[in-house]
Image (tube, helix red, strand yellow):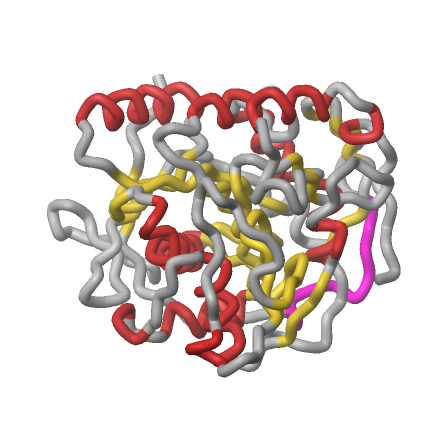
Amino acid sequence: MPSSPKFLHSRLSSPSFASRRSLFLMLSCLFIGISGFIFGLTAPSGYLCSHSITELRSVRVLWDTNSNAYTNNDGSGFNSEKKKRHKVMGFVGIQTGFASDGRRRSLRKTWMPSDRQGLQRLEESTGLAFRFVIGRTNDKSKMVKLKKEVAEYDDFLLLDIEEQYSKLPYKTLAFFKAAYALFDSEFYVKADDDIYLRPDRLSILLAKERTHSQTYLGCMKKGPVFTDPKLKWYEPLSYLLGKEYFFHAYGPIYALSADVVASLVALRNDSFRMFSNEDVTIGAWMLAMNVNHEDNRALCEPECTPSSIAVWDIPKCSGLCDPEAKLLELHQKDSCSNSPTMESDD
């Protein structure tokens, strides 16, 4: 029987970044086929095999809004000096909600393994750890249903923050803080549960040598390029920057380097200005921090290509328009699941 979610308390330590990254890439452990993928790829020496998951568990993090601490419900806490953070090259938090159980089912039938051993092999192959990230609700029936899913699949990061679309910026901040407390990672990736992802290609992208330690990586746009009438996406930013729109990443997937996340962790929770859109909120914070914006269009391709990393229906939808069906449909195409992984010089 799977164990119950663990409760952790962590004192946040200082980060280290690209200095730990090897100057060359080596062939990773084995060609491992996971859900139709063929992971014959290169990844940084030292992240694969020797840093594989030894005890994969869903984790519940209680976020104290008055401080940067993570506490048990009994107040006992967790001492980070006694237990080191799990080391990976990248931690990918797949943002999900209580109405998205169908999306999670489809994902577990495509690029994200549904079993503990499969997730371990995926981490060993790519240096990336994956968890579904979800908050809480006062609806007891939904929480009972979630608890059963956690027990069955054991692939969640549970945040003690209300799960509401209007509170996505708060959830995103809580995610980055929790991920940093639990994982010693060079990049922290926020991804939505309605995109088709190639973990092998994402691994190669994150493994690139970079001269700037503070990196904001995503498919960049200047201002709100499109609107979603159903979700009322449009948010004028003229009050923030006059008539100028600022460069920021599309919301379905982006990554922050360890130095950037460490800066977010160090700030007081009430020092952040929140906007209604999560991607706009993160973009505003990145502008204030003067980070290096790295634009990569392979993170927002509408079709599977030899170089696509994330596929979604841009610009029609902020993700795949019919994700439950489209994820399965895409996975059946060799161009999506079985095409060779190509290294890019970009």
- Residue 233 horizontal/vertical position (percent): 47, 52
* Residue 167 visible somewhere in the drawing: yes
| Quadrant location of the C terminus in the rendered image | bottom right
Q: Start and end of the magenta stretch?
A: 18-27
**Front residue of this view, candidates 70 and 143:** 143
Tell me how many marks there are. Answer: 0
* Residue 78 visible somewhere in the drawing: no
Classify 29 as above or below 46.
above
Does residue 99 show up magenta in the picture? no
Q: In this image, 28 relative to 217: left or right?
A: right
**Front residue of this view, candidates 20 and 203:** 203
**Front residue of this view, candidates 251 and 62:** 251
Residue that appears at 65% across and 35% down? 196
- Residue 124 horizontal/vertical position (percent): 65, 39
Classify 183 as above or below 229.
below
| Quadrant location of the N terminus in the rendered image | top left
- Residue 336 horizontal/vertical position (percent): 78, 30
Q: In this image, 169 relative to 306: left or right?
A: left
Q: In this image, 59 relative to 94: left or right?
A: left
